[in-house]
Image (spheres, coloured by chain):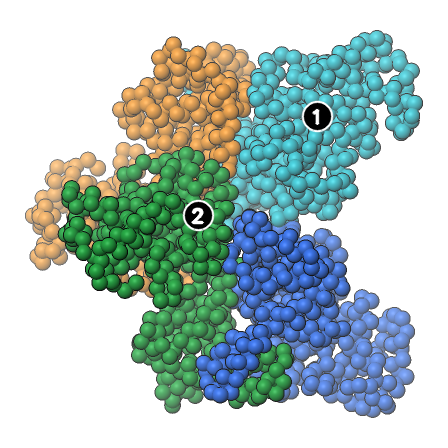
Chain colours: A blue, B green, C orange, D cyan
Amino acid sequence: MSFLSDMLAAITERGRSLVDFTSLSQATPMEQTAALCHSLLSSRGEASALATASEILLRYRAMDSGGKLAFFRMLLQDFGPDMKPLVAAVNTFVASPNERAAEALHRLSEPRRQNLFRMLNQSAQGTAELIQMRAELLALLPDHPELDPVDKDFQHLFRSWFNRGFLELRKIDWRTPAAILERIIRYEAVHEIADWDDLRRRIDPSDRLLYAFFHPRLPDEPLIFVEVALASEMASSIDSILDPDRTIIATEKADTAIFYSISDCQPGLRGISFGNFLIKQVVEELRTNLPQLNRFVTLSPVPLFARWLSRHQIEDSEMDALSQPDWWHDAKAAPVLEKKLPALAAWYLTGPRDAAGRLLDPVARFHLGNGARLERINWLANTGNAGMASSHGIMVNYLYKLDEIERNHEAYASGQPVAVSASVRRLATGGARLLETTHTTGGKS
Amino acid sequence: MSFLSDMLAAITERGRSLVDFTSLSQATPMEQTAALCHSLLSSRGEASALATASEILLRYRAMDSGGKLAFFRMLLQDFGPDMKPLVAAVNTFVASPNERAAEALHRLSEPRRQNLFRMLNQSAQGTAELIQMRAELLALLPDHPELDPVDKDFQHLFRSWFNRGFLELRKIDWRTPAAILERIIRYEAVHEIADWDDLRRRIDPSDRLLYAFFHPRLPDEPLIFVEVALASEMASSIDSILDPDRTIIATEKADTAIFYSISDCQPGLRGISFGNFLIKQVVEELRTNLPQLNRFVTLSPVPLFARWLSRHQIEDSEMDALSQPDWWHDAKAAPVLEKKLPALAAWYLTGPRDAAGRLLDPVARFHLGNGARLERINWLANTGNAGMASSHGIMVNYLYKLDEIERNHEAYASGQPVAVSASVRRLATGGARLLETTHTTGGKS
Amino acid sequence: MSFLSDMLAAITERGRSLVDFTSLSQATPMEQTAALCHSLLSSRGEASALATASEILLRYRAMDSGGKLAFFRMLLQDFGPDMKPLVAAVNTFVASPNERAAEALHRLSEPRRQNLFRMLNQSAQGTAELIQMRAELLALLPDHPELDPVDKDFQHLFRSWFNRGFLELRKIDWRTPAAILERIIRYEAVHEIADWDDLRRRIDPSDRLLYAFFHPRLPDEPLIFVEVALASEMASSIDSILDPDRTIIATEKADTAIFYSISDCQPGLRGISFGNFLIKQVVEELRTNLPQLNRFVTLSPVPLFARWLSRHQIEDSEMDALSQPDWWHDAKAAPVLEKKLPALAAWYLTGPRDAAGRLLDPVARFHLGNGARLERINWLANTGNAGMASSHGIMVNYLYKLDEIERNHEAYASGQPVAVSASVRRLATGGARLLETTHTTGGKS
Amino acid sequence: MSFLSDMLAAITERGRSLVDFTSLSQATPMEQTAALCHSLLSSRGEASALATASEILLRYRAMDSGGKLAFFRMLLQDFGPDMKPLVAAVNTFVASPNERAAEALHRLSEPRRQNLFRMLNQSAQGTAELIQMRAELLALLPDHPELDPVDKDFQHLFRSWFNRGFLELRKIDWRTPAAILERIIRYEAVHEIADWDDLRRRIDPSDRLLYAFFHPRLPDEPLIFVEVALASEMASSIDSILDPDRTIIATEKADTAIFYSISDCQPGLRGISFGNFLIKQVVEELRTNLPQLNRFVTLSPVPLFARWLSRHQIEDSEMDALSQPDWWHDAKAAPVLEKKLPALAAWYLTGPRDAAGRLLDPVARFHLGNGARLERINWLANTGNAGMASSHGIMVNYLYKLDEIERNHEAYASGQPVAVSASVRRLATGGARLLETTHTTGGKS
């Protein structure tokens, strides 16, 4: 790749002498940038196109956030489809609605932005720069929903470029280049990696593995990764997994693989889903290389449980203890809450739905939609501050059972009840009842 | 890549058990295949989708040519855009022709074939199989022009997947894996490679180089390659380049790189142009690694010259010698023809245009359109049977002058006269006059 | 490695300017070379040492065979141990025969040739050149046994440099660089590889494998390789293994690995044994990757059988048929010989010993000494001209049974009877009796 | 390599079942170990030899330091040359002192330890374990000089195995596997690397490089490495080189390469010199890749200067300031000392010799012996605690001038005056005079 980059840089450099950037000097900077974009779309020479693309990206990078907003607005207004020929094509279609007319419609209704992005992509660091550009667009989108069509164009192209067929699964270990490991430290989003020693504890011992997806055009940039612990039983607590003083077991002694952390690395690729396929591919990889493994399970957070619970005004004095700091060290309160919280969590994860008919918990949606089964609710599984605050310390196991995955997946997709173990089903029933009997004024869902 | 293939194969295998292929048993084979395609488009599970895609490709491969024709017809008829929602979107657009309505048009006018191809692409050898499928479609197209929309969909996807940003330039030499070298032997289309010894003479000596483009998903399949001879002067004859007994010169003695053969390897990628960029990238590569090189030139065939000439009934008894076998060994005829044929070739290459306003010679169109200059006409440069039959033994040099390429390219694209050396210009003028004065009934063009 | 070579070449080049080669001009060429060798041993600078070593090797290469003989004689006479200090050390030892005195003896009795070879080895292609030098010495040795001490020094150093710990096992297949495959074709010594197609048939199909040992300093030079056929039974004929039209079986269908050809590649490394360890390492490699394999067996020639047999004047008219060409197509002679030849071969392989107490057949010595068992004698197993001439078409299987190898090896080493199957034992007994009863005047052994 | 290790481990495992370790149970542990060593020397089977070697190394590792001392004594006493045949060979030689008799002497005077080490070396981690074993022997040697013959055997074998021809130079950067980088942090012996951020500052910026030598059998273990700073002038202070806030310059702006740290990594390889060749090879590498560099210089410590100076009772009140803490911040003392200390250092580095006729400073011996020139004395170049304590803050530049290296090297080796710049020569003369005039009772040299 670096060879290709060097070549592109050399050609770009040669092209700069061919493009007359000075003619732009009378316009405002944004008018100049727009002129460059138009010029790029109509350019014919390799080198001048590369030089123009590179100049546009340089200018973009130098903009402050106001400038970037203006840039995206310019893309929205100036680089949609060309309306005049499109209207003509529509008229032709109305007169005679056949396949040929549809083809013309399709061609002419494509926003010119897409071609612009394709040409920007050809410059040396093009793909990385466009991912960054979209990340900044996504940050603006909540306040500027009118920019959504620009994002749609990014999505369309990224889906094609990051097609699963192009992704490469790599095992990350202590022999991996530091340039990549450094990014793993930075991108871990679920259970923070404190430093290089902490990282080593997650990739070097015989019972720890880490896998990541890469794309050929971004050879040092992981797209998504998953951390795996090998064990002889289903883990019930993240604290025990991350404990620096835990007992390391030999690879061949393990029969269970625990996926305890999945992190997306590229905000600019949001919505271009990889996680789904990553888990399945890692399962196949592990089954091939470590045939003694017979259980594949996650240890997952329940991120919105505490928030959901707080919205219900539950009239249950026993649960008031939750508002005390460190209630879980309280010998009286803890056993009581241990009877109630897991049941409520089980219900929260599997019962209520939002307006769109979806489960409330995003992690549950991901794994259950992916074909896993909610296997177990774990009490006091994450006693860190964040874990106690977001989920009262509860974590859960989703079980990927190979001969059930597809069936669960199809069942979930067609709206049937979610797959749960018998014990979780009992808990959830209890949780639902508890909620009915105790809360007076319903919170939202 | 092979790892990914294994994984895909394993998942596919698992998926087969989930898809009920027997339910298809009552329909005709083509109805079954169509049903599988519909099922693929609506499938939700990873594994069942992969199994279905794999089954479709298996069935396609097993079809005879009649079956494949029927398959493409089925794709044409059943997998265009869904007309009903498209008509509705058109009506919305007519009522209010804005960007949002255009976006709907664009989305709904996309033929469903494209998504079908995207999903077939995800199976283990998907990309290679689709390239093969298109090659077979292209062979049918002349007799079945109505299938053109299916080809358009292939083109659209291949342009995206084989985007230059994904291509990788590799030097091919005697340390390259045999699996790749074997394909180089098979794919060489200009100057046939007789056997492994012949191949070695083209990649192993210090004054011979070969570069190819690869795609990450087809790691052993060259897409296009170029053969380069290093020399201390512009070559005037292919015979001397391919001579097994020629004197090998040291790399550092050379100042000229001669591109003497460019071969496209994948008929299924016809029209997805790589050659243009390949030459420029190889020039940059050579300039970086061998800074002593200062001339980059081709030694190219003139493939249609003899055919063109034969269409003109030239009344010139001196040229009747051309119909004798081995006229070029005839001490009387040869000197006379040496005065006339190069001039006619120069004119043929630069003067006459076809109905679409294009130069007649496809190789000339490629290099001149690419920014090169027609530098020299070489007499008796290729005295093999094929060379004598197609071009009366003439070959030409196109010169890639770094600081002219872009200008020539732009000039060519805007219809200005093609770039030629002074001597070629004189020859062409002579050739035009010769033609005027001697031929009575004009041939076409 | 090539990087290291470049560096050495650059340093050598620099060193040339420092060494005054002209001062040598008055002596004879061999005196000059001797002077360079002395100068190398006493040189102190890196660069001048490299330049001197390189000059010596250059001169050696340019010598004709008479010159090389003189060169080795010069090494013998001028570069043995320095006798004067050695005699002094011997006297010290005689006076007081302790460890310290022994150490001095050891140091001073080392021929100076060894240090000379060590310094020659440091030049860019040093190792390869020294291997070539020894190959040429070995060719001279039969007529010049006095050069044996020079060979002893080569052996001593090569044993250290080609210590097993430095060897690297590589699988050779159709993805291997052509530069290596070309050598495999050239070096195959048992069953000639006709061309690249023949090579491909031995490394590309799912039931064919080839493994070679390499040394880090000679990355493209195989040292020894073994060809393996996977099958579902013990092969009884090389013709069926090499048949281009045979049925290929899937890897996972095989339960037997047949080692049908082992070739040493470097004549200059004769006596530095690798074959022993190669077979065992390949067995481990196969067991790890293809656990379904449960039988490891050779298909081996019996190279000296026909010669041995001809030395016995056997008075048996039935065996006279052997002198007819193509006797094995003779419907009368063949069945008779089939009863006698295998028995004689079994006896030849396991019974008679030479003056040194060794088995007569070198291949038998290798495999039986290596721990294998002589399992089966195969009739008409190699009907090529060479096979019929050397062994009347007989080949044999040596079986490597994992839990027997060490025991057999130890038994063989301590002079116990060789390991054979029951059926081979019966045959051998019959062969011995046949010989007793039929031959009148004994041949040697 | 890891593949080879796996194979060796598998064979070893198989061998364990063949060796009857229980028969050893009656002896003391050290008697058992000695018996295993004898058994290894006489073993015939591959597997049993590997199992025995592995068992010996296991037992060695488990010994406490008393046990290890006993182990080395056992090697000394039991595994020297076999005296009986050696005495016979000596007698033969005395009777007839020829080459053949010398060869026998050489063979029989080799301590059996060498063969023992060769066989231990063949086990999976053999080389690494022997290096560790020698490191522990070296630590015992000062108190147990009688063990020196054992060390001699290690040296002899290591010189052969770590022959320059086997070493591989690698560039270490931020893309290097973390397993190697971690060792770089650990092994840096001159200017400590504080953490991963500090490491990154030394290998990632465009003006910092690090090169290391590796051996094929120890692929993740650097043997020695050198750190290089690129600059546009000869550095006069380590503080400025290591400053985290320094200005980074572009590679192509630099004309000087500064070798500011060289660290040996393997105590067990002490005396097997690599540094000499490392510097020269890195110089060639830099010259090839960065032709704009024209100055190669070290920034080196003067480790024993302060100790040397303190041994002279200098009667110079101005120099008493040296005993104050932080004297270099004292506006009165500092300028005075700046006049005297550099001169004394110049003299210390180039003038006095020890009993063996060698320069006093080990770093000076290394670089001057290597062909460099002492170019400059730098005042207040290392103001860290260690630097002030050992050398009063002085550091020096040794200049590697390509066309002088060999000449200087030869001159040094033949005892001529060391190579110094004119300014250093003047300083040294001054320093010598200063010493003469001021000190009364001479310290040792």
SS class, disc 1? strand
Residue holding disc 2: B400
Q: Judging from the image, what secondary structure is the residue with disc 2 in?
A: loop
Name the residue type under label 1.
Asn
Residue D129 appears left or right of B70: right
Task: Specify whether residue D305 is in view.
Answer: yes
Alpha-carbon neighbours of circle 1 within 10 Å: few (<14), some, or many (≥20)? many
- Where in the figure is residue B83, as x and y percent of width and height? 50, 87
* Chain label for disc 1: D
Decide which of D178, C230 is in the foreground and name it.
D178
Residue C236 versus residue B225: which sits nearer the camera? B225
Residue at 34% x, 42% y: name it: B235
Nearer the viewer's eye, disc 2 or disc 1?
2
Residue D8 visible in image: no
Residue, disc 1: D397
Label 2 to label 1: alpha-carbon separation: 50 Å
